[in-house]
Image: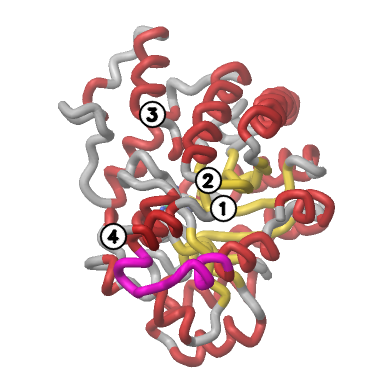
Amino acid sequence: DETLEEIARLPKVELHLHLEGAAPPAFVRGLAAEKRVDLGRIFRADGGYAFEGFGPFLSVYEAATSVIDGPEDYARLVRAVLETAAAADVVYCETFVSPDFCGGGDVAAWREHVAAMREAADAAERDLGVTMRGVVTCVRHFGPDRARRAARCAAETAGDWITGFGMGGDEAAGEQKDFAWAFDCAREAGLGLTTHAGEWRGPDEVRAALDHLRVSRIGHGVRAAEDPALLERLAEDGVVLEVCPGSNVALGVAPRLDAHPIATLRDAGVKVTVSTDDPPFFHTDMRAEYIGLARAFGWDAGDFDALARTALDAAFCDADTRARVA
Ligand code: ADE
Ligand code: ZN
């Protein structure tokens, strides 16, 4: 279908992409073989990642990440991820990068990882025409102490490549307010802020993110659709949701794409954007997300252009970068 083909090829802006979660299974398998680590249990017979549900997803994610080790591996990963992104016509993406996985929270080690990732991203920008920026992320189920270390790393590298700070991981672990110190530290360093909320827990978790962490963006946030008063607040305050429809369907947050709350959120005037989260885990990419949404909700090229504009406006990069990408 010609219209779908046109939509698939639109330039795209992606705000919510976990770097390790974007590692192709073949890439991880290759590293495991090089390092003689047996990771057989995390792969299916067809080569994909093997998991069922969110808990097992996080375990497989962390097992895969365990063989991605050192600045050189991370530089290769950035290259592989940007090749995939460019093939889906992504022109700008922000990726979650984690000091916990890159040097264990040590600032000097973290600096080396950032330098390597940045160099790979700059090369990919020249070769492939896709711009990447890093959003340092802490991991909720690793707890507030490790989040503080991640935030210090973020503050030490804040600048034109590291543009933001966020939190992912198990939303059932602890409370948003336990991480206020880390987010304050990142805010003082001038970083943009986002946290996963309202993917698994309900509307009150989204409120807690806004009240205690004072973020301008929310990772997922889709369960806000259950609460009209919260929708009004999100719309009024211009809070941007990083919605990942394919991820939500794959993990069972939404039963089917055509029953996904993204249309409700958008109709309520909330700023929604579209991302892939962890594309090879969920068998998706940005083209597939666009085609799925066009089919499920009848969105046209103009709707997707508006979505990409919202995403670029909400990007944590500086104005020069935004102008160059647009
Ligand atoms: N880390 C990677 N993907 C995630 C998700 N969907 N939710 C929370 N943490 C994550
Ligand atoms: Zn995520």
265 drawn magenta: no
- As measured in the structure, the alpha-carbon distance from the residue carrying label 3 to the one carrying label 1 is 30 Å
Answer with left or right where residue 46 lies relative to residue 216.
Answer: left
Residue identified by numbered label 3: 64
**Number of the front mark, 1 or 4:** 1
Residue identified by numbered label 2: 89
Residue identified by numbered label 1: 11
Q: Position of residue 132 (x, y in %)?
A: 65, 41
Question: Main structural element of the magenta stretch: helix, strand or loop?
Answer: helix
Q: Which label's residue is closer to the chain start, 3 or 1?
A: 1
> At label 3, which amino acid type do we have?
Ala
Looking at the image, is 25 positioned above or below residue 216?
Answer: above
Q: Which label's residue is closer to the chain start, 2 or 3?
A: 3
Q: Which label's residue is closer to the chain start, 4 or 3?
A: 3
> Are the residues flagged by discs 1 and 2 in contact, CB closer than 8 Å?
yes
Residue identified by numbered label 4: 249
